Image (cartoon, rainbow, N blue to C red):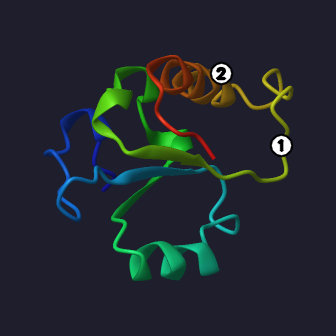
Amino acid sequence: MVRSLAHEPSPVTAPGHAPVLCIEQQPNAHLGRLRRLLRDAGVRVVERPGRDEDLARVDVTRWGGIISLGGEMGAHDGARYPFLAPEVDLLERAHAEGVPVL
Protein backbone atom coordinates (compact mmCIF):
# COMPACT_ATOMS: atom_id res chain seq x y z
CA MET A 1 0.00 0.00 0.00
CA VAL A 2 1.42 3.36 -1.03
CA ARG A 3 0.82 6.21 1.39
CA SER A 4 -0.02 9.55 -0.11
CA LEU A 5 2.36 12.43 0.52
CA ALA A 6 -0.63 14.70 0.92
CA HIS A 7 -1.60 12.81 4.08
CA GLU A 8 1.82 12.02 5.51
CA PRO A 9 2.53 13.50 8.93
CA SER A 10 5.11 16.23 9.03
CA PRO A 11 8.47 14.43 8.73
CA VAL A 12 11.13 14.91 11.38
CA THR A 13 14.87 15.07 10.74
CA ALA A 14 17.92 16.76 12.26
CA PRO A 15 16.93 19.86 14.25
CA GLY A 16 16.50 22.84 11.96
CA HIS A 17 16.47 20.77 8.79
CA ALA A 18 13.41 19.68 6.87
CA PRO A 19 13.56 16.27 5.17
CA VAL A 20 14.14 15.83 1.46
CA LEU A 21 11.50 14.35 -0.83
CA CYS A 22 12.85 11.88 -3.38
CA ILE A 23 10.57 11.03 -6.31
CA GLU A 24 11.31 7.75 -8.07
CA GLN A 25 9.88 7.00 -11.51
CA GLN A 26 11.33 3.51 -11.97
CA PRO A 27 12.23 0.88 -9.38
CA ASN A 28 15.67 0.42 -10.96
CA ALA A 29 16.42 4.18 -10.94
CA HIS A 30 16.78 4.80 -7.22
CA LEU A 31 18.99 6.78 -4.85
CA GLY A 32 21.62 4.06 -4.70
CA ARG A 33 24.80 5.36 -3.01
CA LEU A 34 23.30 8.80 -2.53
CA ARG A 35 20.92 7.32 0.08
CA ARG A 36 23.85 6.42 2.35
CA LEU A 37 25.61 9.75 1.83
CA LEU A 38 22.47 11.66 2.76
CA ARG A 39 21.82 9.46 5.79
CA ASP A 40 25.42 9.85 6.98
CA ALA A 41 25.00 13.63 6.65
CA GLY A 42 21.92 13.49 8.90
CA VAL A 43 19.43 14.18 6.11
CA ARG A 44 16.13 12.35 6.30
CA VAL A 45 14.92 11.29 2.87
CA VAL A 46 11.32 10.31 2.16
CA GLU A 47 11.22 8.20 -1.00
CA ARG A 48 8.01 7.92 -3.00
CA PRO A 49 7.09 6.48 -6.40
CA GLY A 50 6.11 9.44 -8.58
CA ARG A 51 3.77 7.40 -10.76
CA ASP A 52 1.59 6.58 -7.77
CA GLU A 53 1.49 9.93 -6.01
CA ASP A 54 -0.89 12.85 -6.29
CA LEU A 55 2.00 15.28 -6.74
CA ALA A 56 -0.36 18.20 -7.35
CA ARG A 57 -1.35 18.05 -3.66
CA VAL A 58 2.19 18.05 -2.26
CA ASP A 59 3.05 21.17 -0.24
CA VAL A 60 6.59 21.84 -1.46
CA THR A 61 7.30 24.30 1.37
CA ARG A 62 7.43 21.52 3.98
CA TRP A 63 10.43 19.88 2.31
CA GLY A 64 14.08 20.84 2.63
CA GLY A 65 14.63 19.84 -0.98
CA ILE A 66 13.29 17.72 -3.80
CA ILE A 67 15.28 15.02 -5.60
CA SER A 68 13.75 13.96 -8.91
CA LEU A 69 15.20 10.69 -10.11
CA GLY A 70 15.17 9.85 -13.79
CA GLY A 71 14.68 6.74 -15.81
CA GLU A 72 14.30 5.80 -19.43
CA MET A 73 12.11 8.84 -20.06
CA GLY A 74 13.20 12.42 -20.61
CA ALA A 75 11.64 15.66 -19.38
CA HIS A 76 10.02 16.22 -22.80
CA ASP A 77 8.44 12.75 -23.05
CA GLY A 78 5.14 13.76 -21.46
CA ALA A 79 3.08 12.38 -24.34
CA ARG A 80 4.49 8.89 -23.74
CA TYR A 81 4.66 9.23 -19.95
CA PRO A 82 1.70 11.30 -18.72
CA PHE A 83 2.80 10.98 -15.07
CA LEU A 84 5.67 13.38 -15.83
CA ALA A 85 3.48 16.51 -16.13
CA PRO A 86 2.54 16.59 -12.41
CA GLU A 87 6.19 16.06 -11.46
CA VAL A 88 7.35 18.91 -13.71
CA ASP A 89 4.68 21.11 -12.10
CA LEU A 90 5.88 20.08 -8.63
CA LEU A 91 9.47 20.99 -9.55
CA GLU A 92 8.36 24.36 -10.92
CA ARG A 93 6.45 25.08 -7.69
CA ALA A 94 9.46 24.05 -5.60
CA HIS A 95 11.74 26.33 -7.61
CA ALA A 96 9.30 29.23 -7.29
CA GLU A 97 9.25 28.75 -3.48
CA GLY A 98 13.04 28.55 -3.25
CA VAL A 99 13.08 24.85 -2.35
CA PRO A 100 16.31 23.27 -3.64
CA VAL A 101 15.79 20.82 -6.50
CA LEU A 102 18.18 18.13 -7.67
Q: Report the side of 60 relative to 93 (left or right).
A: left
Disc 2 secondary structure class? helix
Quadrant in the picture for residue 14: bottom left
- Name the residue type under label 2: Ala
Q: Up-down: is 3 above or below 57? A: below
Q: Residue furthest left?
A: 9
- Name the residue type under label 1: Met
Q: Looking at the image, is mark 2 or mark 1 earlier in the sequence?
A: 1
Residue 73, numbered label? 1
Identified at 49% across, 26% down, the residue is: 94
Could you say where residue 26 lies in the image, as x and y percent from the top left? 66, 57
Disc 1 secondary structure class? loop
Q: Label 2 neighbourhood size at 10 Å, few (<14), some (14-19), many (20+)? A: some
Task: Give me the C-alpha separation between circle 2 and circle 1.
Answer: 12 Å
Residue 3, numbered label? none
Q: Report the side of 25 relative to 95 (left or right).
A: right
- What residue would you read off at disc 2? 85
Q: Up-down: is 34 above or below 45? A: below
Identified at 15% across, 45% down, the residue is: 10
- Pick the quarter of the image with the N terminus: bottom left
Task: Choose between 10 and 26: the one closer to the eye.
Answer: 10
Q: Residue furthest front?
A: 16
Identified at 29% across, 41% down, the residue is: 4
Q: Report the side of 86 relative to 72 (left or right).
A: left
Q: Label 1 neighbourhood size at 10 Å, few (<14), some (14-19), many (20+)? A: few
Quadrant in the picture for residue 79: top right
Task: Choose between 38 and 68: the one closer to the eye.
Answer: 38
Could you say where residue 36 lies in the image, as x and y percent from the top left? 50, 82
Could you say where residue 7 lies in the image, as x and y percent from the top left? 19, 37
Q: Up-down: is 96 above or below 70? A: above
Could you say where residue 53 lies in the image, as x and y percent from the top left? 43, 37
